[in-house]
Image: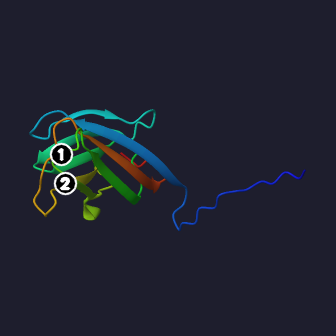
Amino acid sequence: MPIHGFNQIVTTTAKAPVLSFFKFNITDASGAVGTVSQGKANLIASVVRNSAGNYTVTFNKPYPLNILFCDPKVHRNAISDTFVKMEYDVGSFTPGGSDSTMVLFTTNAGTTATDPPNGSEVHVMLVHQAIKKLVD
């Protein structure tokens, strides 16, 4: 019986795309951020709540060069929790400098900035260009 090999093909104009995941939990009704989990990636330095529904993600050095895709999702603790939608602010990514950051924001079913419910988790999938050391 012949053996067939199949290869997945990824087409992109970016050199060396990398898929990364991280998550953080919401620890109270005011949207406070708990522990950031990212496995062994060590991509994220911190996640900070700026205001209702607005969170800044700070990357560890070396920084990603470019974010090609970002898919943040809020997973509610209970079906009865308020529905919120999280998005990535596309103009917020700032590579290099003293810090490299991006902003995630959440809204309710309308367009009002709303914190994720207490006990929920935010899961983020990022596709970014390979990381290389930038000059400090």
Kind of residue at disc 2: Thr
Eyeballing the image, is 70 above or below 38?
below
Q: Which mark is residue 116?
A: 1
* Upstream in sequence: badge 1 or badge 2: 2
**Residue most extreme to the bottom:** 13
Q: Secondary structure at mark 1?
A: loop
How has the structure been colored for display? rainbow
Q: Amino acid at mark 1?
A: Pro
Query: Which residue does the image show at 10% across and 38% down from the upper left?
Result: 29
Task: Give residue 3's position: percent from left, percent from top.
Answer: 84, 51
Q: Which residue is mark 2?
A: 106
Residue contact between numbered discs 1 and 2, judged by CB atoms under 8 Å? yes
Label 2 Cα crowd, 10 Å radius (few <14 / some 14-19 / many 20+): many
Pick the residue in front: 2 or 13: 2
User: From this viewpoint, is residue 111 visible?
Assistant: yes
> Which residue is at a point 25% across and 60% down the rendered structure image?
89
Tell me the residue at 27%/46% (across/down): 57
Quadrant in the rendering for residue 118: top left
Looking at the picture, how far across and down is residue 27, in whole percent? 17, 33
Foreground pick, 26 / 131: 26
Task: Judge the density around disc 1: few (<14), some (14-19), many (≥20) Cα neighbours within 10 Å.
Answer: many
Along the line of sight, the residue nearer the viewer: 48 or 116: 116
Q: CA distance from mark 1 to mark 2?
A: 7 Å
Instruction: Tell which of 119 and 72 is nearer to you.
Output: 119
Q: Mark number for residue 83?
A: none
Residue 33 in percent (x, y) is at 20, 37
Check the picture and name the quadrant holding the C terminus.
Answer: top left
Residue 67 located left or right of residue 47: right
- Quadrant of res 128: bottom left
User: Residue 84, how many percent across, how many down?
Assistant: 19, 53
> Which residue is found at the position 16% from the left and 51% from the top?
54
